[in-house]
Image (spheres, rainbow, N blue to C red):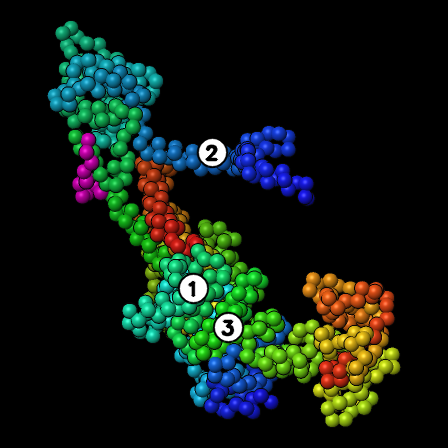
């Protein structure tokens, strides 16, 4: 011990750089060890990161990409797309454009890609499909002497003489388009390229989004109203009882959503258990309309999503010792007031997390409204499924999906701003 | 004994025949009679599960007694809800509201009492000054150390000037040094404000240093309630003798009993004169209690009424003093303290020593479990 002392004090007073036992500079050695540790950590996390990347991030970016992807015209009418870019967009395009169109359509006819182009252009102006198909069928064209391709086209169908049709081609001659996103919000692109609201009779999606948010809002409210007191009760019960009841709360998780919805149909339909029970008791004379409307959707969705409020609420409530309430009461506050001022604020973060979870799950809900609702209850997801499965319109499906995603992210951002950055996290 | 000197008007809190049972089968508190005097620092001390917290909770109003009366001043408390009792309380886990700053925590009871803004500010400031935390008014509890939080809790229990403050193991979560520091601080605050404090702990050192009186609990019964020195010098039964401070026990049988004195025969046939405190009649088994510092050794033992031979079994070094572990009358584990300067260097393990003590210093108590 004593022999070491002088050396130590020398090192400290001289302030020379510290070295490790093998003579290497200590700072270098420590830095290397630190780097090794980090590498190890990365290696441990890498498999999960790759998995997430492939199954989560990549699909999301592909989805976002799909919603603005516009390959049909660019790929299948390449020459036209190139030339029409320099069109002044007032009079008809030049003769070269018409000739390029003829060439492209001929090639497309051989490659059998005409229907794809036709379908895409038909989205902007209905009837464009038949125009393209009719024209392509006539390809290749033999021009008489002195005849221009433009005249020939217009002669074939006078719509070729309408600049609006060429506008649509010009608009879609880019490999991306806001068209699907605009459509999902009931907007359309003006000739100047700015968005405007579609005419009233063509609007659909704003009200569908509105309905989705509205249903989700009420489901969340009902879940909170039912879940909060239940979680409070569970959290204040002796452990043995609360564990048992918790199993009941979790029980629905062990059956598939489809089965649960089907059993709700059995319970709620006109001749279902609830109606017949109420009728037999003489409480009602006519069966109540409980299924295939808003009421049925609310009942089933609240039932399915309730655990997502109860579980986070329960876990924060469990972590609040009863002494907080006792302290507040001993300071002279009425128990009810103390609950609101002391207990409730401490549960807000957890309960809000649960509510957010429910809301986010709601806005993507599909099965329950599809089975238990009327057309009036169908939410955004229904239309996503509709566009993917029925009309095979990936652009619209992806655009609606992207908007849902954006709504979710916005909500999450709002939540973390309100709750995450709160001082509660310090307590 | 001491309570006779005090009149009823000095009493702030009185428990009369209070019983408490949680399950209806066993009594956690059995027939508690206790008077707490105005301005007193009373500590409830006892092993875990002895019902201290339960008593405190009944006083605070969070539990209701199954029997008996609790009075505060001349008001019957039994049916007063806890938020109307105006009793300050300090909890072991501090129970500071985590979403409020220190100042907001302190203002909480004052806002409830509908005080004006400026008065609240003044009082909060004063209370923070009292616990020396003026600089931390705007911190959240989560940003403070345990000791600081405990001071805030203390200030919050005092800021609305209750006449009675209850503390349930308030220092239990602090480390030893901080705990000792806080003990003094709480004691000083008590002296300065003249409030009545009921304090619960199972740390006997804490109880002895802080309290005017200590009530020793066991199994829901107060075994003894007295000032610290009385408790230490004159324990009324074996439990108190063993629970408070260091104690030597000698087991034996009472052979003669007259008045305050008795003669006890030890296992090896030796007899000892002792003060009869908790013995019934001759022929009964008894456990005698004597404090280590009352035992005299060799030369000093000559003048004692009781003299015995002991075998030196071990030296234990403590710096300022040395403890000798002795075998006395066939019973092991008998400790004697010797100041370092008085240690005879010729003593060694296995030596026979003369030991002795005055008859008044050894107390014959109820027989405790005899362990070798
Ligand atoms: N709410 C309750 N319900 C049922 N039993 C209880 C309840 N509170 C306390 N008890 C029981 O009452 C007995 C005394 O408990 P109490 O908390 O008063 O002890 P204590 O002296 O404060 O102990 P500690 O020093 O460990 O805090 C214990 O056996 C305990 O299990
Ligand atoms: Mg306790």
**Label 3 CB sits under 8 Å from any ligand 2 atom:** no
In the structure shown, which secondary structural element does the residue marked by tag 1 occupy? Answer: loop
Q: Residue at x 76, y 76 (%)?
A: B296
Q: Separation of disc 1 and disc 2 at Cα?
A: 58 Å
Residue where numbered disc 1 is placed: B132
Residue where numbered disc 2 is placed: A54
Dot 1 or dot 3: first in sequence order is 1
Residue A410 location, quadrant = top left
Answer above or below: position of B292 versus B148: below
Q: Which disc is residue B187 wearing?
A: 3
Is residue A342 or residue A381 the one in the foreground?
A342
Residue B218 visible, this orientation: yes
Parent chain of label 3: B
The quadrant of the picture occupied by the C terminus of chain B is bottom right
Residue B215 location, quadrant = bottom right
In the structure shown, which secondary structural element does the residue marked by tag 2 occupy? Answer: helix
Q: Separation of disc 3 and disc 2 at Cα?
A: 65 Å
Is residue B210 or residue B124 the one in the foreground?
B210
Give the class, few, some or many, for how many residues have Cα within 10 Å of label 3's Cα (few <14, many ≥20).
Answer: some
Is residue A146 or residue B68 the one in the foreground?
B68
The quadrant of the picture occupied by the N terminus of chain B is bottom right
Q: Is residue A25 left or right of residue B282?
A: left
Q: Give the tally of numbered discs.
A: 3
Residue B298 location, quadrant = bottom right
Q: Separation of disc 1 and disc 3 at Cα?
A: 15 Å
Residue at the farthest left position? A91
Answer above or below: position of B106 versus A353: below
Residue at the farthest bottom position? B259
Residue A199 colored magenta?
yes
What's drawn in magenta, residue-wise?
Answer: A193-203
Answer above or below: position of A248 versus A116: below
């Amino acid at each position: 011990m004593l022999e070491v002392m002088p050396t130590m004090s020398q090192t400290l007073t001289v302030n020379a750089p510290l070295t490790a036992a093998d003579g290497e500079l200590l700072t270098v050695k420590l830095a290397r060890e630190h780097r090794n540790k980090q590498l190890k950590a990365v290696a441990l996390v890498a498999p999960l990161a790759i998995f997430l990347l492939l199954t989560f991030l990549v699909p999301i970016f592909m989805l976002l990409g799909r919603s603005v992807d516009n390959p049909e015209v660019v790929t299948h009418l390449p020459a036209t797309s190139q030339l029409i870019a320099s069109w002044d967009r007032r009079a008809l395009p030049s003769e070269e454009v018409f000739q390029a169109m003829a060439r492209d359509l001929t090639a497309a006819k051989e490659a059998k890609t005409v229907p794809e182009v036709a379908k895409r252009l038909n989205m902007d102006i209905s009837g464009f499909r038949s125009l393209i198909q009719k024209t392509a069928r006539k390809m290749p064209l033999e021009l008489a002497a002195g005849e221009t391709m433009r005249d020939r086209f217009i002669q074939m169908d006078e719509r070729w003489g309408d600049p609006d049709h060429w506008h649509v081609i010009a608009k879609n001659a880019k490999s991306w388009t806001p068209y699907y996103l605009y459509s999902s919000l009931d907007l359309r692109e003006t000739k100047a390229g700015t968005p405007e609201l579609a005419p009233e009779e063509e609007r659909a999606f704003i009200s569908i989004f509105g309905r989705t948010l509205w249903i989700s809002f009420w489901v969340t409210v009902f879940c909170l109203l039912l879940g909060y007191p239940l979680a409070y009760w569970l959290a204040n019960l002796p452990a043995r009882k609360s564990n048992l009841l918790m199993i009941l709360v979790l029980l629905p998780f062990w059956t598939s959503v489809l089965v649960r919805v089907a059993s709700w149909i059995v319970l709620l339909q006109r001749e279902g258990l609830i109606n017949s029970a109420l009728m037999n008791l003489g409480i009602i004379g006519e069966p109540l309309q409980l299924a295939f409307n808003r009421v049925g959707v609310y009942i089933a969705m609240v039932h399915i999503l309730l655990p997502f409020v109860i579980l986070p609420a329960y876990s924060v409530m469990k972590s609040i010792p009863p002494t907080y309430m006792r302290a507040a009461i001993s300071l002279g506050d009425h128990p009810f007031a103390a609950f609101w001022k002391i207990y409730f604020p401490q549960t807000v973060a957890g309960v809000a997390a649960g509510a957010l979870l429910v809301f986010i799950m709601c806005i993507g809900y599909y099965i329950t409204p599809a089975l238990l609702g009327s057309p009036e209850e169908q939410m955004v997801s229904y239309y996503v499924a509709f566009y993917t499965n029925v009309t095979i319109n990936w652009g619209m499906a992806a655009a609606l999906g992207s908007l849902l995603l954006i709504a979710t992210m916005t909500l999450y951002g709002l939540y973390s701003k309100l709750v995450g950055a709160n001082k509660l996290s310090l307590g | 004994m001491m309570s006779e000197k005090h009149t009823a008007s000095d009493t702030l809190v009185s428990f009369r025949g209070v019983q408490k049972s949680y399950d209806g089968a066993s009594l956690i508190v059995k027939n508690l009679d206790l008077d707490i005097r105005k301005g007193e620092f009373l500590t409830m001390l006892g092993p875990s599960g002895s019902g201290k917290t339960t008593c405190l909770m009944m006083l605070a109003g969070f539990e209701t007694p199954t029997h008996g009366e609790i009075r505060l001043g001349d008001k019957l408390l039994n049916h007063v809800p806890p938020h109307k009792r105006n009793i300050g309380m300090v909890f072991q886990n501090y129970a500071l509201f985590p979403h409020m700053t220190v100042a907001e925590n302190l203002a909480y009871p004052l806002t409830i009492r509908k005080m004006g803004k400026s008065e609240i500010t003044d009082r909060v400031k004063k209370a923070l000054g009292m616990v020396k935390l003026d600089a931390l008014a705007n911190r959240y509890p989560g940003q403070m150390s345990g000791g600081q939080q405990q001071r805030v809790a203390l200030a919050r229990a005092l800021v609305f000037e209750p006449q009675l403050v209850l503390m349930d193991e308030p220092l239990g979560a602090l480390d030893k040094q901080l705990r000792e520091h806080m003990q003094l601080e709480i004691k000083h605050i008590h002296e300065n404000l003249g409030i009545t404090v009921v304090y619960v702990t199972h740390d006997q050192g804490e109880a002895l240093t802080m309290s005017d009186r200590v009530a020793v609990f066991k199994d829901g019964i107060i075994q003894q309630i007295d000032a610290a020195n009385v408790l230490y010098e004159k324990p009324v039964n074996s439990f108190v003798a063993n629970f408070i401070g260091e104690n030597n026990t000698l087991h034996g049988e009472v052979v003669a009993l007259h008045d305050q004195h008795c003669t006890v025969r030890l296992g090896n046939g030796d007899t000892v004169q002792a003060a009869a405190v908790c013995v019934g009649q001759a022929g009964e088994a008894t456990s005698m209690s004597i404090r280590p510092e009352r035992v005299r050794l060799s030369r000093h033992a000559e003048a004692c009424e009781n003299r015995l031979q002991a075998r030196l079994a071990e030296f234990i070094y403590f710096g300022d003093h040395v403890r000798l572990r002795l075998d006395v009358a066939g019973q092991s584990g008998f400790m004697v303290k010797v100041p370092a300067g008085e240690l005879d260097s010729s003593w060694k393990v296995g030596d026979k020593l003369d030991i002795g003590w005055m008859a008044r210093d050894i107390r014959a108590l109820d027989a405790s479990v005899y362990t070798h």
